[in-house]
Amino acid sequence: MYIIKVKGKAKIPDYIQLRDENFVLIAYFRADRPLKDLHRYGLEGKETPLAAVIEQLAFGKLQKLEV
């Protein structure tokens, strides 16, 4: 799974994209909202490590997600 942080413009907030091994979009959520429904993506119970990854993630840089 891959993760990328997308910079918002003006009134559009920053977003996080989760993509599978074929780079198909599987999740798209606001970076400033609490993480919920992570069980849908196989990340249940990994809210804290995922929040830490999102915090230090640079905008526009695709990164392999390892939590």
Image (spheres, rainbow, N blue to C red):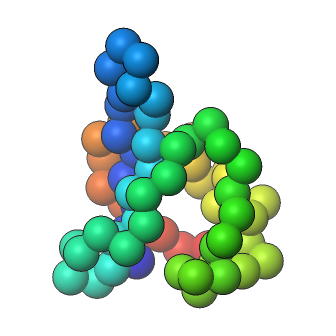
Q: Which residue is drawn at 78% across and 60% down?
A: 48
Query: In the image, 45: left or right of 67?
Result: right
Q: Which residue is drawn at 57% across and 48% down?
A: 54
Q: Can the viewer see residue 24?
A: yes
Q: Which residue is drawn at 33% across and 20% down?
A: 9
Query: In the image, 43: left or right of 2?
Result: right
Quarter of the image where one finds residue 41 = bottom right
Quarter of the image where one finds residue 3 = bottom left
In this view of the protein, which residue sits in the foreground, 19 or 62? 19
Query: Is the residue 45 above or below the residue 36 in the image?
Result: below
Query: Is the residue 58 above or below the residue 26 in the image?
Result: above
How many discs appear?
A: 0
Q: Quadrant of the N terminus?
A: bottom left
Looking at the image, the residue that sits furthest to the front is: 11
Query: In the image, 1: left or right of 22?
Result: right
Query: Is the residue 32 above or below the residue 23 in the image?
Result: above
Q: Residue at x 69, y 57 (%)?
A: 35
Q: Can the viewer see residue 58?
A: no
Q: Quadrant of the C terminus?
A: bottom right
- Where residue 27 appears, as percent x and y from the top left, is 43, 66
Quarter of the image where one finds residue 60 = top left
In this view of the protein, which residue sits in the foreground, 67 or 42? 42
- Where residue 61 appears, as percent x and y from the top left, is 31, 47
Query: Is the residue 18 above or below the residue 32 in the image?
Result: below
- Where residue 12 appears, as percent x and y from the top left, is 39, 26
- Where residue 63 appears, as percent x and y from the top left, is 37, 60
